[in-house]
Image: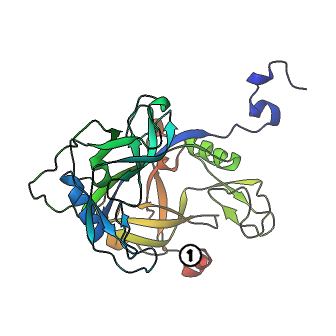
Amino acid sequence: MLPQNREHVSLQFVTGLSEPLSAPLEVGFDYTRSLGPVHSRFATELSRRRIVGVRGSDGRVHVPPIEYDPDTAAPLDEFVPVGSQGTVVSWSWMPEPLEGQPLQHPFAWALVLLDGADTPVLHAVDVGSPEDIRTGMRVQVRWAEQRGGGIRDIACFEPATGTPAAPDEAEPEPVTMITAPVHLHYQHSASPEESRYLRGLAEGRLLGQRCPQCGKVYIPPRGACPTDGVPTEEEVELPDTGTVTTFCIVNVPFLGQRITPPYVSAYVLLDGADIAFLHLVLGCDAADVRMGMRVRAQWKPREEWGYTLQNIDHFRPTGEPDAPFESYAQHL
């Protein structure tokens, strides 16, 4: 029987299981891409407050320009200047803008048919309310103060008030690359098996699970054997020693790297496990790391531990004789 204050009852109280761990997960990177000749011309013209389309085989002017004809698939290269004013073809209201969108206050997404174009472009229209926009409404480009970023050079559209801004006469540097920041926000909830594994790490323990049919020990645990498809309920505590099965020497620097190359990333098969996992092998020259090398976890100081495999700073050689190839050949 559940207590009366059920809303405060934890999963652990009811079932004996701990509540799954959950934490925010932030992923972000700058996506840099090169532009082909068509998109480079479009971006370059935008940087000087001009807009160009490209003419297709049927005579239509496509804005933004497309690289290949939609009917014949032939490359397109006849650029056509179009106006910076146009007409709203259709629209929808954005009451709560999302991160990264052109405006951070309510606005309208609209298909705008620029003067001289035959296909509409999708962009934001800065109006105060849904009552301030309508199909057929005349709008004009509001240019960004800093340009050279492709379509972001158009900050948004706004109601047309008169003469559009004059283009820059200076010849700009060609825009051949653009960088688009990407940010993803997750609330990641671990499975019950993964949560027990993470709680074990917070205690300095390495917990796997054994398949009741094939006997394989998986770490981190999956909750089910991928070979037999049955639940893995038997928990197995593993030592923090193992064998290097495969490895690579990292020589290329990259953003966010915490170790200066060269260093070694290796798959380490813990003693008693059947699945190796990726970690660092330090404490020796990178050139000395080899398949079969015996290693031990180098834990961070206890006060730095959390619910993460990063509690193990790296693995280092134990000095034991190498494991025979046959002992890990089935785990590569």
**Depth check, front residue: 294 or 273:** 273
Q: Position of residue 330 (x, y in %)?
A: 62, 78
Name the image colouring: rainbow
Q: Position of residue 16 (x, y in %)?
A: 79, 36
The structure residue drawn at horizontal position 42% and vertical position 65%, both measured from the top left corner, is 265
Residue marked by disc 1? 332
Q: Secondary structure at mark 1?
A: loop
**Depth check, front residue: 289 or 20:** 20
Q: Position of residue 216 (x, y in %)?
A: 71, 67
The structure residue drawn at horizontal position 78% and vertical position 65%, both measured from the top left corner, is 229
The answer to whether residue 22 is left or right of residue 38 is right
**Depth check, front residue: 237 or 132:** 132
The answer to whether residue 186 is left or right of residue 60 is right
The structure residue drawn at horizontal position 47% and vertical position 43%, both measured from the top left corner, is 135
Q: Quadrant of residue 239?
A: bottom right
Badge 1 crowding class, 10 Å Cα cut-off, few under 14, some 14 to 19, many 20 or more, is few
Q: Is residue 197 above or below residue 319?
A: above
Q: Position of residue 73 (x, y in %)?
A: 42, 79
Q: Quadrant of residue 232?
A: bottom right
* Quadrant in the picture for the C terminus: bottom right
Q: Residue furthest left?
A: 170
Q: Quick check: can you spot residue 322?
A: yes
The answer to whether residue 35 is left or right of residue 327 is left
Q: Residue furthest right?
A: 1
**Depth check, front residue: 23 or 78:** 78
* Quadrant in the picture for the N terminus: top right
The amino acid type, in three-letter code, at marker 1 is Leu
The answer to whether residue 212 is left or right of residue 324 is right
Q: Quick check: can you spot residue 259?
A: no
The structure residue drawn at horizontal position 60% and vertical position 64%, both measured from the top left corner, is 271
